[in-house]
Amino acid sequence: MPKYRTYSNLVPSVLIRELISEDNTHSGDLVDCEACNRTHLSKNWKMSLGKREIGAIEGSLRERPEKYCFTDDSEPIYYSEFDGKKIVLECPCNFLTSVEERWRRQRGMIEEFFRQSDTQDKKTFLRTVTRRSGFHIVGRSS
């Protein structure tokens, strides 16, 4: 039985949810959270699928019920795109909590990044960031 990842036992703060979902919220009746691979289903999930697709999901539900999360009402599943992945906002994996915790731990570095990017020209900024990060740009002279 596969274990589905949980990033935190704490639910994401209202602030991080609002920042990530602002102008970036989508919805559907069947949505995979790409942070943990759980599938979220609204009460209306069968309405947009054919018999074959419904049968496949129902078979998977019997085999791996821990993979599926259901809503209690007829609302759709809300998700946002973050770092190229669909992130279900109400997913028990609490991925957004880990993002917020990481940002808080790295706050000084992030603030320095924006401070320098706002004050230096692009060439100097790029040289500084690559030198500090240990990355090298091939084919460019400093």
Image (tube, rainbow, N blue to C red):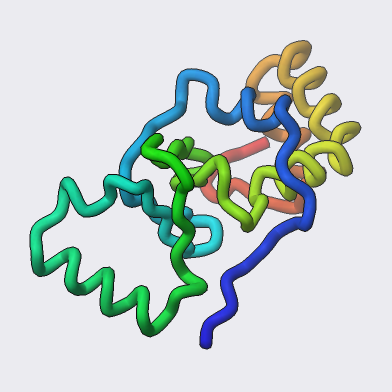
The foreground one among 110 and 141 is: 110
- State whether residue 71 is above or below residue 81: below
Image point (47%, 19%), residue name: 23
The foreground one among 121 and 4 is: 4
Residue 97 horizontal/vertical position (percent): 73, 45
| Residue furthest left as drawn | 51
Image point (54%, 20%), residue name: 22
Res. 11 image quadrant: top right
Count of labels in the image: 0
| Residue furthest top as drawn | 119
Q: Is residue 6 left or right of residue 41?
A: right
Residue 25 horizontal/vertical position (percent): 44, 28
Residue 44 horizontal/vertical position (percent): 28, 45
Residue 2 horizontal/vertical position (percent): 53, 82
Q: Quadrant of the C terminus?
A: top right
The foreground one among 115 and 142 is: 115
Res. 65 image quadrant: bottom left
Q: Is residue 137 left or right of residue 110?
A: left
| Residue furthest front as drawn | 73
- State whether residue 51 is above or below residue 91: below
Q: Is residue 68 left or right of residue 132?
A: left
- State whether residue 126 is above or below residue 2: above
Image point (55%, 40%), residue name: 89
Image point (37%, 35%), residue name: 27
